[in-house]
Amino acid sequence: MATSEPQTSDGLTPTQLSFFQQNGYLIIPSALPPQTVSRLLSETHKLLSDFDLTTHPLTRFRTGGSSGHDHVGDDYFLSSGDKIRFFFEEDAFDASGNLIKPKEQAINKIGHYLHGLNPAFASLLATSPKDDERGDGGWIEDLKARPAAVARDLGFKDPRCLQSMVICKQPEIGGAVPPHQDSTFLYTDPPSAVGFWYALEDATLENGCLSFLPGSHLWAPIEKRLVRKAGANEGTEMVDNEDPRFPPGEQYGEDKKPDEVKGREEEAYVPGEVKTGDL
């Protein structure tokens, strides 16, 4: 759903909020002004160009497939929560482990503390012009649907940004990302994860846009959690989720699954094609 309803505040309009609550996703056109998109893209290219390949452990990002069995889990990945690090595509290497792509075209993603260490990305979370006292562009005047305001509209009392990433969709290479729920990887008790995804380039069916299963946040339980392997310094594993599987509220539960979706979940996904700057 891409709404043309004018933004009258930093948060969501009533129509946008209603759509999100019903469907679990929302597309807001032109949330980022063009100059901000240019700044973020420029900063991304600089990060890719400047990182040192000679000291990099060549960690490759793996989703682990539908089971998550082989998800990336070395120390470089697990200790990246307060750093800016670079994770390679598996297909960027040959059978002998040699990098066969230029490093700028071999990275799957950059993460996970851009919002804390990089002023360009930190500006997306600014809550007032006072955040620009350093003069480094910390306040984006024309930003629509500011994350903090949106979080308040969604009912969050103390929202936190746990991680931030740039996802690179490289030409010719790249593994498939299976359908998933973010709370499997960023679990809170009760589940509360909400993702904010900005398009820095057009995302289409042809080049691999996001897809959504409308309403599934109401009836699809968080069945698994990705956790560190017990007693190990490295490694992750998928375990059964024995804690709450839904956010609190009578609107949630496996019994809320519509009959018309049962048995045809894969057919019910809808593409989320977006233009540069959309949220």
Image: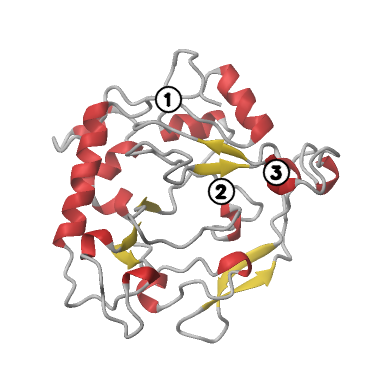
Left or right: where does residue 104 sit relative to residue 182?
left
Q: Quadrant of the C terminus?
A: top left
Residue at the (21%, 58%) spot, across then down:
48
Task: List the residue tagged with mark 1.
Answer: 29
Q: Which mark is drawn over residue 267?
A: 3
Kind of residue at disc 2: Ala
Q: Is residue 81 above or below residue 141?
A: below
Mark 2 crowdedness (10 Å alpha carbons): few <14, some 14-19, many ≥20:
some
Q: CA distance from mark 2 to mark 1?
A: 22 Å
Q: CA distance from mark 3 to mark 2?
A: 25 Å
Mark 1 crowdedness (10 Å alpha carbons): few <14, some 14-19, many ≥20:
some
Return the disc, 3 or 2, that comes first in the chain's sequence. Answer: 2
What secondary structure is marked by label 1? loop
Kind of residue at disc 3: Glu
Kind of residue at disc 1: Pro
Q: Nearer the viewer, mark 2 or mark 1?
A: 1
Q: In the rendering, at what x and y percent does residue 160 appear?
A: 46, 47
Residue at the (26%, 59%) spot, across then down:
105
Return the disc, 2 or 1, that comes first in the chain's sequence. Answer: 1
Q: In the rendering, at what x and y percent does residue 211 appear?
A: 56, 43
Mark 3 crowdedness (10 Å alpha carbons): few <14, some 14-19, many ≥20:
few
What secondary structure is marked by label 2? loop
Task: List the residue tagged with mark 2.
Answer: 193
Using the image as rendered, state which of residue 21 and residue 273 is in the foreground: 273
- Inspect this view and state whether residue 83 appears: no
Q: In the rendering, at what x and y percent does residue 44 appear?
A: 23, 49
Residue at the (32%, 69%) spot, across then down:
92
Q: CA distance from mark 3 to mark 1?
A: 26 Å
Q: Is residue 130 above or below residue 105?
A: above
Return the disc, 3 or 1, that comes first in the chain's sequence. Answer: 1
Quarter of the rendering containing residue 207: top left
- The answer to the question of whether label 3 and label 2 lie on touching residues, with beta carbons closer than 8 A, is no
